[in-house]
Amino acid sequence: MQRSSSKLSLLVVLFLLTPGCVSLGLEFSPSLISHLTQAFFEECDPQLAERSLPAELKLMEGLLKSAPDNRRLLTALCVGFTGYAMLFVEEDSPERASQLYLRAKEYGLKAMGRNGSLLKAVGQSKESITKALRATGKEDLEPLFWTTLSWNAWINLNLDKPAALAQLAIAESCLERVLELEGGYFYGTPYVLMGTILASKPKMLGGDPARAKEYFEKAVSLTRGKFLLAPYYFARYYAVRAQDKALFNELIREIASTRPDDLKEACLINAVMKKKAEQLKEKSEELFF
């Protein structure tokens, strides 16, 4: 906590400086913003994180006014708004989460510069989408990943709207590009996202439970089950869809027996997933028939 507070204090100092000094400070402290994001995910107290993150995000948006094209700030805002919506907002307030995901997506696309502009401008043809994504490389991986995560999350919450359905192709193509660049990025979350999509869709629309299971297993094995988002989504989306109660119970038990700080870098996500797994377990009688 002391480390996180010291970084936040430094950001406050930067924020109170003149615009030119803010830009200069960000230029000479390139790791400052990434360290703030790291401190957020390392926080093991979900309640503290939920209360503090909105203020930190607004602080970064204030900094952005003095450095509107700062790639690190734009990426951190994409990460922050995506994480906040997914961990703390989506379940209780899907409409608010939708707006936060759109905000995150816009920051992510801007962080990608010209390549992000290309993605915003493409039509719906597979060829134009593929051409735009081909320009993205490893240097775009972080903003592309978080943009992809927020984009797909927004679509998932708005499947009853034509605008969301119209963007399915490009959002899923972005995920395919992330998988090409580095499927194991952020503890295998791209595998989790693809597994979720394949498990959720009906077969006539491209759903494939068998492939979904392979992606989930790959994600779980990557951290030996220490990144709890993978087994939680595996249980929630695949095991329930396949009506595999034995697998469901096994995954819930594994989550319950894993300490959030077994993967310190993702302690916050793990703590939230443990809570969600407990709630999911309580609904198990309704989920299996």
Image (cartoon, rainbow, N blue to C red):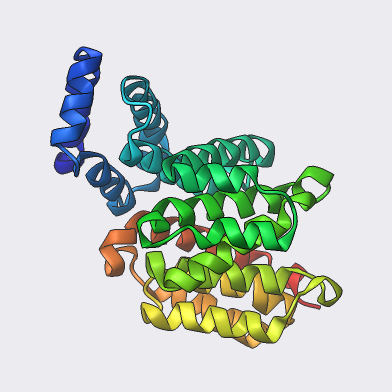
Q: Determine if residue 236 is in view.
A: no
In the image, 126 versus 55, the foreground residue is 126
In the image, 279 versus 1, the foreground residue is 1
Say whether residue 251 is left or right of residue 171.
left
In the image, 65 versus 124, the foreground residue is 124
Dividing the picture into quadrants, the one containing residue 16 is top left
Residue at image position (61%, 79%) is 248
Q: Quadrant of the N terminus?
A: top left
Q: Determine if residue 286 is in view.
A: yes
Residue at image position (26%, 62%) is 264
Say whether residue 163 is left or right of residue 188.
right
Please give the count of numbered marks on the rendered protein.
0
Q: Quadrant of the C terminus?
A: bottom right
Say whether residue 226 is left or right of residue 170.
left
**Residue at the right extreme, as displayed:** 204
Residue 238 lies, in percent from the top left, at: 66, 76
Please determine whether, in this image, residue 287 is positioned above or below residue 142: below
Residue 114 lies, in percent from the top left, at: 47, 43
Residue 167 lies, in percent from the top left, at: 72, 51
Residue at image position (62%, 35%) is 99
Please determine whether, in this image, residue 269 is positioned above or below residue 254: above
